[in-house]
Image: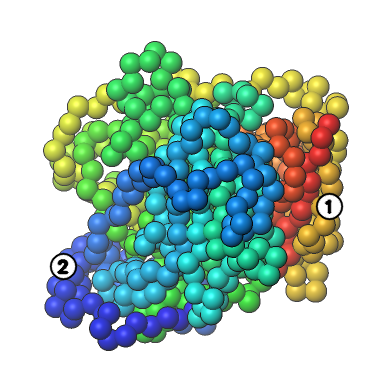
Amino acid sequence: MQVRPSSSTALPASRRTALKTAGAAAAAILAPQVARSQLVIAPGRVPSPTTSLWAEPLPVPKPAWPMAALDPVPSRTPFAGEARRADHQGWSDVAPDLYELKAEPIWHEFHPDLPRQEVWGFNGQTPGPLIHARYGKPVIVRYRNNLPRHARGPGSPEISIHLHNFHSPSESDGHPDDYFPSHSLPGAWKDSCYPMRYAGDDPCEALGTMWYHDHRHHYTASNVYKGLAGFFLAFDELDSGNENDGNPKALRLPSGEFDVPLMVQDKQFDSSGYVSFDALDPDGFVGDKFLVNGKIQPFFHVRPRKYRLRLLDGSTARVLDLQIRHQNQAQKFTYIANDGNLLEAPLEMSSVHLAPAERADLVVDFSKYPVGAELFLVNRLQMLDGRKPEKDFLRTPIPLLKFIVDQPSVPDYSRVPTWLRKLPEVDIDYARSVAVRREARLGRSNGGWTINDRIYSSKPAFKPRQGQWELWTVRNDSGGWVHPVHIHLEEGRLLSRNGRPPPPHERGRKNVFYANPNERLEILIRFRDFKGKYVTHCHNTLHEDHGMMENFEVVAS
């Protein structure tokens, strides 16, 4: 994928030179890391051009404002001209918040040392606009496809946008086969209705940090890599998004400008500085440049107070092990949520492991550091190709983001309570005893990826009944690959890894289950509220695109 601008769109030489010079001193501080960054892909691959460290500030997304109206007005049944869909199962008489996200080509600068270039995004930006939603207030997003019909490079101009791990009705889930426009779905836009209701009407099932991304069958990896992704955050009475909330039930976690989504991705660039991608490598794809919110190794000026950092591994295949370091020492932080699900109680940790699509919410208190202190978000996990990480950590971690504690202090009314969100009340032993048992064997055949020896089919592989407990055994019998398994519609509970209890941060609700080589997972799950077709798949998106995905259809109990 190489899209080159005309000379009229290139950066002015004076600006590029100035920015490159400004970053030189900062780069010298972490010179070993710069050298080491060239060793994060397999030997023999041509590395990306060198880029200076800390050349640009971190883009911090601000919540998009809901629209006053959409034309035509959304309705339960589809309009003529809208891409084909079923009637909205989650329709409500409550007036919804309205948004329109337009998938379109955009011009983007990953780094001042690289040329400005064409990628894809939503509403002129990548990552796309940040959406804030609240339980009890429905949201309708009109996804409009403005991509060119004859796009250059990998990727498909047909899209199907999935709100990852939301409790979505089937017709609004962004099913891989529901891409548009196509011969069967000719419309250029489609409304997704997110009812903003708890699964099973249980507030313990609330979700928080989510992200939306394209899910078009065969092209998920390419389209997300080209920029079709963004954050979607949900709030309720408990996690209210207001650290000054007078409601005694509110957690009062860091909010507003101190609640920061961070999308971490890796990319590869050719010798001329244009982003490149190999969509035909079924192993997966890793790049040697690390981006946070669309910029290569940016910096972030912070105030001496608590911040909520919402980390997402938005990569195609790369697995991360992240630390926050000060004076090259790993720092403690408070871990509060896994995959967008608040834990029952916060954990003190000094590293976080993320596979593609996994998320972790952390609270970091920068008031503990002197004015002018610099801290670094680093990745210490080496992964040379799309198969699996290396066994040993990097001696010199790769710096991803620099925090500079130099902004004026302000009152900090936020807190991290001793207890966060209760888990749903489930009798695990009883659920096990009545559960339908299923097995998912992750494998490879004839160059493609399989579940239970089958590549993806549009026909449902099984039909779970609403409300019925299911116990899934996910087996990764391969010694050569890792597979982050994502299940649509519901959160599950990871009961064991190879017969042993999972670590504390994985004992809550999850929707991405990382299967190491030669590992067996037990997952307890049930599907409620909505009927229709959904999928489960590996979130190494090239594995997904090459067959490691399964359809299922939720049917009435």
Q: Quadrant of residue 410?
A: top left
Total label count? 2
Q: Earlier in the sequence, mark 2 or mark 1?
A: 2
Mark in the foreground, 2 or 1: 1
Q: Is residue 305 above or below residue 153?
A: above
Image location (x, y in percent) of residue 469: 79, 31
The circle drawn on residue 22 is: 2
Q: In what element is the residue under mark 1?
A: loop
Q: Which quadrant of the figure contains the C terminus?
A: top right
What's the colour scheme?
rainbow
Q: Residue sitting at 43 percent across and 63 percent down?
A: 121
Residue flagged by tag 1: what amino acid is it?
A: Ala
The circle drawn on residue 461 is: 1
User: Furthest-top residue in view?
Assistant: 248
Q: Residue sitting at 54 percent across and 76 percent down?
A: 149
**Residue 437 visible in the displayed image:** yes
